[in-house]
Every structure is written in structure tokens, then in C-alpha cells.
Image (cartoon, coloured by chain):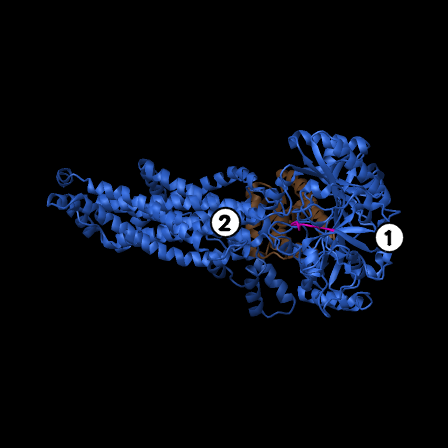
Chain colours: A blue, B brown
Amino acid sequence: MPDWKPHLQARLEALNLDPGRGPDAIEEICAHLDDRFHELLGRGVSEVEAVSLALDEMIGPTQPRTPRPLKPTSPGCPNPKRAVWLRCGFKSIFDDGRFAWRGLRKAQGFTAVALFTLALCLGANLTIFSIVNGVLLRPLPFPSPERLVVMYNSYPKMGRDRGDSSYMNYHTRRGQLPAFAEVAALREDAAVVGDAGTTEQVHVTRVSAEFFGTLGISPLLGRAFTDAEMTPTSDAVALLTHAFWREHFLSDPAIVGKTLRIDGVPKTIVGVLPANFLFLSSKARVYLPLSVTADTCRVENLHNNGVEVIGRLKPGVRLEQAQAQVDAHNATIGRTFPFAKEVTAAGFHTIVAPLHAEHVASIRPILLLLQAGGLLLLAIGLVNLVNLLLIRSSGRVKELAIRQSLGAGRRQILQHLMMEIFLLALGGAVLGLALSLTGGKLLGQLDLHQLPLSPEVAWNGRMALVTLLAASFTGLGMGIPVAWFHLRTPLASAIHAEGRGGTGNLAAQRLRHAFIVAQLGLAIVLLFGAGLLGLSLKRAMAVSPGFRPDHVLAGKLSLSKTAYSDDALRANCVERLVQAATQQPGVGLAGITTDIPVTGSHRPNVMTIIGYTPTPGAAPFLHEQYGVAGNYFAAMGIPLKEGRFLEPADSARPQRVCVIDEDFARTYWPGRSALGQRISDGSDTRSESEWFTVVGVVGAVKQTDLTDRKPARAIYFPYRYFAMETVFLVTRTTAASESLQRALQRMVRQVDPELPLYDLRSMEVRITDSLILRRSPALLSGIFATVAVLLAAIGTYGVLSFAVAQRRKEIGVRLALGAQPIQIQHQFLTLGLRLLAAGSGLGLLGAWVAGRAVQAILFDVPAIHLGTLGATVAIISGVALTACFLPARRASQVDPLVALRTE
Amino acid sequence: MQDRELKKGSAELLILSLVQQQPRHGYEISKLIELRSRGELRFNVASLYPLLYRLEKRGWIQGRWVEKAGQRRRRFYRLTPAGRKVLPAQQHAWLAFVDAIQRITSCDHA
């Protein structure tokens, strides 16, 4: 029998045994090894091999945890030194912590300024970061969200880079493209929900049967839609969102199978969606089937865009593969499209893009720039604090030198200093986090809910981690220069210099000055950036929308197909609405339009101009199109340029008429009158009686937003001929609009009790809302810049004051020897000016970079706007010189007697 | 089933179950685990004995030396009344865990 004991002794540590077990454990394991040894022999393994195998298996690869050193149980423990060191290390850190805490409490002013600066700078960064996190970083709440894509139809040569897709795109792609696991279509819509008299307008999304499967979610209750429910005769089903279910049905668990009246039709509720379900930024409360008639699936409708098509890639499929398959599929299907030549001329292609990235594409540069602004602010704050810390440690040179002479090593001194800095950093980070969480409410002013994915400033694991990282980074940022200063300064000579009352350490002074230069430079960059954004906002706000927005109140209505089955019924309802609104006290003029300006929404289309031959190969122009009724133009304040407005009688005339805007007229009939020209809203093969004759030319309005420079080339039809379901009631009011809102809603209910009037806002509010992506960044960067300028002023003042205090004795001697106070003042002002000049140079360089960086989101402002740059430098110079002037004047007022006596 | 975490969670339960019927010694326990799991689970000395001692320290099993002529003496472990009480709870928790894992993994998303 082999003797296992020596082997076991050699492997004792790896065996993880409780040392208290002692020889018993060894004996037990020896028995185990005996058994194993015999078993191996029985299998024909040689003795030597059996011993080696049995020993090897003891600590085999399947051991569940890594070996851990034995607990010290006797004085001869394996590693007593380490334990003592750890204990001492912790004790010294704890002692330093306590000492630093006392020191910070003693220097209350310094601590308050430092914490305030850190809280402000870190708070700003954490707030922006939480938005960046919510919008850009957090993955979409679906399984494998990286495989979700969206498909757009793009017609770049027609000025339409990103458009919707058509139902036909979805219909022909599903099941046909091997790169995709699923393809689904959806359309945002609105519907009237509830019984007559208590109806309300809710956002709904109409989705194809694969929608929820594509996203990878299943309903909480009931089931998703089926393919069979996608026709107008079988689509009387609905899926509720969790919130709608809770609010309208008090979370009734037996909801499935009950009915809900939607657009006047009872629909069977087939399911309830999970509580956290949110598709991108959708406001939908109810999901309905995207039902279509067989007519929709004709090739003529291939470019009848109006739905969003999303897809889920199969695992391992790359975006380029999917894109290639979609391109090839488009080419095949497109051959049979009757206007293939035109869409080819328009540069048609489909873009397959990641769903998340695409959804936040417009806000990404803005958020990243704001974060960059926040980091600049943090840099300024840090520079400020480092200067304060350097000044503070200069004052403590004596204390530290004494500690060193009493035996403290350099490491201990540094550890002591760093502890103070890290305490500050941590405190600042916690305060900053608190500020950002409470300040997050202030951001309500910035209309966060209007941002994609509705981010909110909230405490979560990632925020905690980032706060900790920010604290560490801040600690290092402040600690490294201070450590550098101390490592370079021989303390003994420092005491000597201090005692002699000289000018202090030259290196430290240079460092302080360099930091002031950096701070002024950074402040210029931030202020210039904020100035550019502010100017850009101002210019955008100054753009004329093309109508008079004052005193215009507009609300939305949906004339559903179930209640108003044909164009004539809708036209009739619209007429009654206009009449009733006009008679409403407080309303001067009233009209109806199918689309309202500056809302971002638009549905451009191509038109055929009779007698106009397009340049061969050129893409056709896109036209905004509206159906209008009543006194729409006058109510909206759109000016008449030529001819006349549309009249109620135009709907009944045998000859169809329309009004176009000046962009339209200029495009086709430059230099001559457009009146009497004829336009067809389809191909020119339509019969002549369906052509529209131009009877008026009106001013152009901004349809998508104020900064859209693309000509609208709008055409206005009598509502009868463009009777869309969604219409806006537009009123020019003479009374206060708040009191009128309820009156208008009542008035609409009188015309049709099932018809809610919603989204009632004045046009001025709509314009303001449309500028959110310009206003919020401008406002935030303005706040950042203000803080930055303030910090720069405090920093400059602090360093100059310190310089004056340090040189009091020298100033006293010079004054006693006959120097004029004004000379002393000049000396310090000159120092300030030198720092300012260097800072401005640096700032101008930074401003050039910053201008380039923000250029993409500027409107009508060049990247290097000299006026803004001049004003920025002037403001910073004014502030910095004021900050210099106070210490300089104090220097000139030094009393030589007092200064020398303190020696 | 080679996953470390899974094994760690299940190891105690395995040992308690094996000594439930009759007292067994360490080698026997390790062999039974290997046999009954058809080789999927294996415990080596460095993982088995610390675990046995831990369970013994907790009072869930108790070891007793048994001497036989011509052989080394062996330590046999049996389930204590305290261990007998713990075992159903452990079994229950384990089944719930397995059930939960199954429910999660059997749901096949597109």
C-alpha cells in the first residue's frame, strides 16, 4: 500500500482542509486514496500509474473553487506579515480619513466652495449622462434588440432622404428575404374610444400580425393578433396597453373577450400587453390590426408610403447582408411598377438601419455635444479646485515639513493629502448626484418627454457606477497635480523660503498661472458654443412661418371611416364644423385643414403639371398637399399673392379648382402668372374634368419646422377633393384662448357627440414646441457657460488674491521705499492681462474647434461667427479684469507699516 | 451540468440525499455521485471533503469511525435529525430553481 501522507502534506494548502481537523482528515483521505488505488489496479493500471492518477485526481479540473490560504491557527501561520500589513494599512487609511475630515471641517469656507463647485459640475454631467444613458446607451427593452432593424424608402434626388415605407414593401418582403426572421409593419394613428358623449381621443398603433413576434414579446393576458384579423371584415379586435387596462378597466383579470368601442365599432379585446412594453417613443394606448383591403396589395401602391416597416434579422446575419437582399428584392419587384422610371430618377433605394440607432439619430449629436459641454465645465471646475488646493497646500508646507521631520514618509504625506482630495471628490459626487436627481425635475422645463424614448433622470445601477467613476476621475484629476507639486518641492527649502517671506515656489506659481490660462480658455470655448446655439435659436425663431401665428387656436379631429364612410359625408361634417365654429363667440374666422404647419408631419406627393415637360432624367418635385375648407387661409393668416382664396362654392363647381403657394408657382411658371394653369394629382391620364385649375397663389408656409429650407411647393385642394380622416380646426380668436378651448370642445360635441377635439394649442405654442431641439441645448449650454464664467472669475480672483497676500511684505517694502500705489496696482493688473491674453489665445483655438463641432446643429450661423466670438472675448475679458482689479487695488492699499510689522 | 454555480448549489443536496438511507464513507459518496449522474458530475478530494466537514460542522451529518480487520479505518457519515429536517427544504428549493430555469429557457423567442 503506498504511503500517501508525504504527498498529502505537500498538497495540504490546495486541499482546502479545515486545519482543526488535523490528522483525522489526513487518515480519511488516505482511505479514499487507497480505495481509488485499488480500483485503478483492478482496471489493469500499473501501480506507479495508479498512485500518480489517484494523486492527480485529488485536485482535478472539476474543483469548484480556487484554493484559499489556510486560516492562521497557530503562531507559525503561513503569512502573518500580510495580515499585519493589511491591518496597519486599514488603520492608517482610517486615521488619515479621520484627520482629513477634521481638516476639511476646520477649513469650512474652502470645503464649501469645493463641494459646491464639484456638486454643480458633477451634477450637470450626471444629469446629461442620465439622458444620454436613457436615449443612446440603454438597449431597447426587447430580446436581442441589436437584431431589430427599420427599413426606409429614400428618394434623395427628390429631397426626401428618409421616408416611410409602403404596405406593399411589407407585404412583398415578409417571408421572402432569408436574412430576416420576421418583417412587420405598423402605422401610428388616433382613434375615438368609448361610448357616445364620453368618448376620448387616444393614440393607437395599427400593427401587422408579426409585430409583437418581431419585437420578441408576448401579451401578458390573451394573445397577439393573427393573420386572419388583417382584413376590414375581421379586424374588430384590440390589444390594450397595460396602462390603458389599468386606468379604464381597473386591471380586470377577465378582460379578454370583453368589448371596447373604438371609432364607434365594438372591438373584442384579445389581450393586454406587459407593463413595461413601450415601442420606441410610441404614445399608443391601444393596438389595432393594420387591416387592408385586397386593393392595397397591388403593385401600383408600391410607393404609396405611409407605414413603418421593421424587421428582426436572423442570428448572425449582418446588416449589409440584409441590405443587399432588400436591394435585390426591390429591383425584382420594382420592374413591374408603372412609374419605375420616375422613382429611379428620384434615386429610390431602401435603407436598412438598426432600429435604436436610427430612432435616436437626430438627437445623438446634440446629446453628445451637451455632454462635451458638461465635461468642459467639469474641467473648468477641476482647474479651479486644483488651484485652490495648491494654494491650500502652499499654506500647509510648514505643517507638512514638520510632519516629515517627525518621521512621516513621503508616501504617508501624500496619502494624507490624497485622502482629503478623495473625500472631497466623493462628497461632491454624492451631492452632484442628489442635485441631478432633484434637478431632473427642473429638466421638465426642457420637455424631456418630447425626446425620443422619453428618458428620465433616475437612480439606477449605471448611474451609481458612473457617479463612482466620476468621483474617482475627479479625485485623480485634482490629486495628480497636487501630488506632483509636493513631490517636486523639497520641504525644507520650502520652509526656508516661506520663513524668509519670499515669492514662494516658482514652479507652483507657474502651475497656478497655467491653470488660470486654461480656465479662461475653456470658459471662452463654452461661452462661444453657448453663444452660437443661442444665436442659432434666435435666428430660427426669427424665421417667418409664412402665417400670422398670434391669436390662432387649432385642434385636431379624426373623422373615422366607420362614422364617415365617404368623402361627401366628411366634407359635410367639416362644413358644419366650420359654420358652428364661426358662430362661436370669441371666434373671428374658422377653417379646416388636413395638415397644420410647423408640426413636423407632412405627406408630400408628386403632381402632374399639364403642359410642363420635366427635364429628362430629372427627379419629379414633391409637393405638400392640403385639403382646406372654410376661411382657412384668412384664419391662419396666410397672405394672398395672386388671384383668390378657395371658397365654399368651389366644392360644388363643375370645374375643379385649387390654390398653390408661391414656391409652386415659381418652380413651374417663373416670371409669369400661374393663374389658370392646370394640375392633376395623379398621372396626366386622368380625365380632363378631374384636373385642377389654379385660381390663387398664396404665401409659402413652413410645413415641417421653421428651419426647413426646402421649398414646400404646396397645393391646396377644396377639402371635398382631399378628404383625409385627420383634420385640424383652425380659429382666429378675439377672446382669450384658454376660455375658448372648452367652448370649442363643447361646440364640436354638439356637431357630433362622438367626436372629440384634442391637441388644442395655439399656433404660437406649436411653434415654440417645434423648437425644442434648439431651445433646450441653447438653454442648457447657456447655464453651463454662466457657471463656467463664474468659476473662471472666482479662480482668477483667488489666484491673484493669493499672489497679493503672498507678496504683502515685498509690496510693503516697495511702498516704504517710495513706490506709488498705482505702480503696484499696475503690476498686478499686468499679470492679470498677461494671463487673460494667453487664455484668450487658447480659447480662440478651442472656439474654432467647438464651432466646427456644433456646426451641424446650427441654423443660419457660421461655425466661426465673428460677432459671437468678439462678444465672448469681451465678456470673459471684462469678468477676468474685474476679478483682477479687486486684488490689485488691495495690493496698492497695503500699509507698509502693518506689512513689515508682521515680519 | 458541469456548470460550477449549479454544482455548488446542488452539492450539499446531493450529499444529504445520499446519506439519507444509510451511512456512507467519502469514497462511496463520490463514486455514487459519479455513477448515478452517469459521469456528468464528479467530485474530487479537494471539493468533497471540505464540503463534508462543513455539513458536519453545521450538524446536518455526523461522521463515525468504523474499523475493519486488515483495512484502514473509515469514516461513515449519516444524516442527523437536523439534516433530516433541512433536506426537504433543500429539495424543494432545488426543484423550484430547476423549474424556473426550465420555464425561462423553454420559452423560445424569435
Chain holding disc 1: A
Q: Confirm whether residue A138 shows in the render.
A: yes
Q: From the viewer's perspective, is residue A763 above or below residue A80? A: above
**Residue A623 lies in what quarter of the image?**
bottom right
> Mark 2 belongs to which amino acid?
Leu
Image spot of residue A162 (x, y percent): 67, 58
Which numbered dot is residue A829?
none
Of marks 1 and 2, the one in the foreground: 2
Q: Confirm whether residue B73 shows in the render.
A: no
In this picture, which residue range is highlighted in magenta? A696-703
Q: Residues within 10 Å of mark 2 (few under 14, many from 20)?
A: some
Residue linked to disc 2: A535
Q: CA distance from mark 1 to mark 2?
A: 51 Å
Which numbered dot is residue A293?
1
- Given the current orientation, which residue lies at the most extreme left position? A817
Mark 1, secondary structure of its residue: loop
Image spot of residue A282 (x, y percent): 69, 46
Q: Nearer the viewer, residue A83 or B110?
A: B110
Q: Residues within 10 Å of mark 1 (few under 14, many from 20)?
A: few
Mark 2, secondary structure of its residue: helix
Q: Is residue A702 magenta?
A: yes
Question: For the stretch drawn in magenta, what is the main secondary structure?
Answer: loop
User: In which quadrant is the N terminus of chain A drawn?
Assistant: bottom right
- Whether the residues at callouts 1 and 2 have beta carbons within 8 Å, the answer is no
Q: Residue at x 71, y 44 (%)?
A: A633
Is A609 positioned to the left or the right of A59 in the image?
right
